[in-house]
Amino acid sequence: MTEENPPLEQRKVELVPHNPAWAELAEKEAYRILEILPIPVINIYHIGSTAIPGIKAKPILDFVLEVESIEALEDHADHLAEIGYQSKGERGIPGRRFFTKDTDGSRSHHLHAFQEGHPEIKRHLVFRDYLRAHPQAAQEYQQLKEKLAKRYPERSGNYTEAKTDFILSMDEVARYWYEQKHQNQ
């Protein structure tokens, strides 16, 4: 497999009800990341389903880390390793550096790092904000996730891949919503 098409990681798919403590746990983990990195960080954002109140999620905290220099991050990836993050390279998204962290033998964190200005940063944030602002769309997403979790109970890579079409179509709707919202302000 090439870096453009990395092999799918396969783990158990477990969806749990939204946990209000995820926001505080994410804040604490973001602080740990910021504290350990000796490089300029623009921001760190809690994304993914654990950042969307009211919907089920895999209990994995997802973050986007926005840095001034992706090369500087690579040079200091050992600092992230000190707090449990393993580097996975670009993992199929050019310009991204992807890290995972396990806690007690289970995946607990995903860290998607991008250099300042990378379009994936805004895409992730707009998607998250759209679902937060539109509970009906968030429920549609949850229903799809429940259906796919039943179809792929032991194949998390297939589960994630199967959500792609929905996410891409929702990205379009979210982008339009974002543009309209900011055009009228």
Image: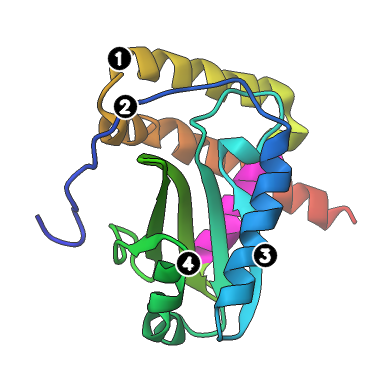
Name the N-terminal-most of marks 1 and 4. Answer: 4
Amino acid marked by disc 3:
Tyr
Residue 139 occupies quadrant:
top right
Q: Name the residue under label 3.
A: 31
Please say whether residue 175 is visible from this viewpoint. Answer: no
Amino acid marked by disc 4:
Ala
Q: Name the residue under label 2.
A: 12
Residue 8 occupies quadrant:
top left
Q: Position of residue 167 (x, y in %)?
A: 47, 37
Judged from the image, the secondary structure of the residue bearing numbered disc 4 is strand
Q: In this view, does 4 lie above or below 72?
A: above
Q: Which mark is residue 151?
A: 1
Residue 57 occupies quadrant:
top right
Judged from the image, the secondary structure of the residue bearing numbered disc 1 is helix
Amino acid marked by disc 1:
Arg
Q: Mark 4 points at which residue?
A: 113
Name the N-terminal-most of marks 1 and 3. Answer: 3
Left/right of residue 29 with respect to residue 99 in the rendered view: right
Q: Position of residue 162 (x, y in %)?
A: 33, 29
Write the start and end of the magenta stretch as one range: 119-130
Q: In this view, does 178 lie above or below 173?
A: below
